[in-house]
Image: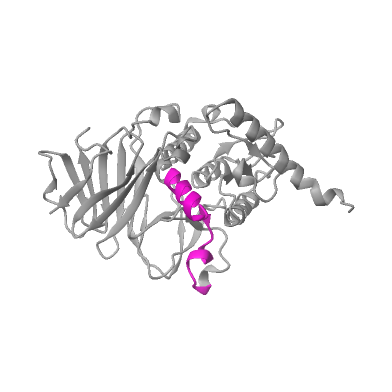
């Protein structure tokens, strides 16, 4: 049988990645990290993928959303695009909007052609650097949620970047490529024009809260608005609980081990559920069962944790609990077996939003949690 070059071209890229992966794995107990642009079916077993040498234009930013949805839909979840596009010098607006979008890509990195103007965050003007820094901090904050989403993808084959039509059957979502689900609970609509105007459709039969404010939004309507300069529109689905880091001063993810955790609870019919998955983040010991899974449930004004699996020792403690959609300020917050856990409580009656600040080390992540809000 005779094969043409085009028949095997991408298989060569797959074999390069698999050979590199197996070689690195033979040398170390650590998980290899490989990034490739050339790939074929099955590449998700060996490498992360990026979308190639895109141009630094608004059109290419928007095109990346559909490309990532396509990749994740076929199982290639560890993917992203160059920030802020590989080629061409870019405007300040495009640069920070690309950073903001990439916070909600499975893989996030800056990369550029040598011929372009240098764009490392520390070289930017102070005004621009603050916006980029905030986006990077948001990325660190969502890492517990993202890592849990990778676990759910691993065991349930869920796309991390999911087209809306995969989850919702309304005809309004069939042609939408510039907004998507990021993990099971977040809906993301990046800004992809210098006007800052965004068009957002929120699927029906759900309750949606804007992450940046906690404000509840009306589902089933298409809205137009000017996006905040510091944020892009991101919404948490009602009925969800997501874990977030409360960041110390850090320069590396290595410093996040044992960092405090915050829980963001978005109520639907006064209930919500979520998960936290934790392992060592470095080795293959999770394949031998060394990991922990925590299931959170809010029901009848009580937050409980079910420890599904407890075979990896998790450091850190719960620092903050935010509840969206709570119609009364909690006057009393108690935890079973604890004397005093609350430092102070903030409540916004207009937004129906409560933030409960806990004392450091009052409740460890490894502890079974049972908190009553009265």
Can you say which quadrant of the picture contains the C terminus? Answer: bottom left
- Which coloring applies here? one colour
Is residue 153 part of the magenta span, yes or no? Answer: yes
* The quarter of the displayed image where residue 223 is located: bottom left
Residue appearing at x 34%, y 60% in the figure: 238
Residue appearing at x 52%, y 30% in the figure: 125
Residue positioned most to the right? 2
Which of these two is toward me, 207 or 40?
40
Residue appearing at x 64%, y 34% in the figure: 22
Is residue 288 part of the magenta span, yes or no? Answer: no
Counting the numbered discs, the total is: 0
* The quarter of the displayed image where residue 269 is located: bottom left
Can you say which quadrant of the picture contains the N terminus? Answer: bottom right
Above or below, 350 relative to 80: below
Could you say where residue 33 lies in the image, as x and y percent from the top left? 58, 34
Which of these two is toward me, 355 or 252?
252
- Magenta region, residue range: 146-171
Observer able to see residue 151: yes
Residue appearing at x 67%, y 33% in the figure: 20
Could you say where residue 115 lies in the image, as x and y percent from the top left? 72, 31
Which of these two is toward me, 73 or 7?
7
Classified by dominant secondary structure, the portion drawn in magenta counts as helix
């Amino acid at each position: 049988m005779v094969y043409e070059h085009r028949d095997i071209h991408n298989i060569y890229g797959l074999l390069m990645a698999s050979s590199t992966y197996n070689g690195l794995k033979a040398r170390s107990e650590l998980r290899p990290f490989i990034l490739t642009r050339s790939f074929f079916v099955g590449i998700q077993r060996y490498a992360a993928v990026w979308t190639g040498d895109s141009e630094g234009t608004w059109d290419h930013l928007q095109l990346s959303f559909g490309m990532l949805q396509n990749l994740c839909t076929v199982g290639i979840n560890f993917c992203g695009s160059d920030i802020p596009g590989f080629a061409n010098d870019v405007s300040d607006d495009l640069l920070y909007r690309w950073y903001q979008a990439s916070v909600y890509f499975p893989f996030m990195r800056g990369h550029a052609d040598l011929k372009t103007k240098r764009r490392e965050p520390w070289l930017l003007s102070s005004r621009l650097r603050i916006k980029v820094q905030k986006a990077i901090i948001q990325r660190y904050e969502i890492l517990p949620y993202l890592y849990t989403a990778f676990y759910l993808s691993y065991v349930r084959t869920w796309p991390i970047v999911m087209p809306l039509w995969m989850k919702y059957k309304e005809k309004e979502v069939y042609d939408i490529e510039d907004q998507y689900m990021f993990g099971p609970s977040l809906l993301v609509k990046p800004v992809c024009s210098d006007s800052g105007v965004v068009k957002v459709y929120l699927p029906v039969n759900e309750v949606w809260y804007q992450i940046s404010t906690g404000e509840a939004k009306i589902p089933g309507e298409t809205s137009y608005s000017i996006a905040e300069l510091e944020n892009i529109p991101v919404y948490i689905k009602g009925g969800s609980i997501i874990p977030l880091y409360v960041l110390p001063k850090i320069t590396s993810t290595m410093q996040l081990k044992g960092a405090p955790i915050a829980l963001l609870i978005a109520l639907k019919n006064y209930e919500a559920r979520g998960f936290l998955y934790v392992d060592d983040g470095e080795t293959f010991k999770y394949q031998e069962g060394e990991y922990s899974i925590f299931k959170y449930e809010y029901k009848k004004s009580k937050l409980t944790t079910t420890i599904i699996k407890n075979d990896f020792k998790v450091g850190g403690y719960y620092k903050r609990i935010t509840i969206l959609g709570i119609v009364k300020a909690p006057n009393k917050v108690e935890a079973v077996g604890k004397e005093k856990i609350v430092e102070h409580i903030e409540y916004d009656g207009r937004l129906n939003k409560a933030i409960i600040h806990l004392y450091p080390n009052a409740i460890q992540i490894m502890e079974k949690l049972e908190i009553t809000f009265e």
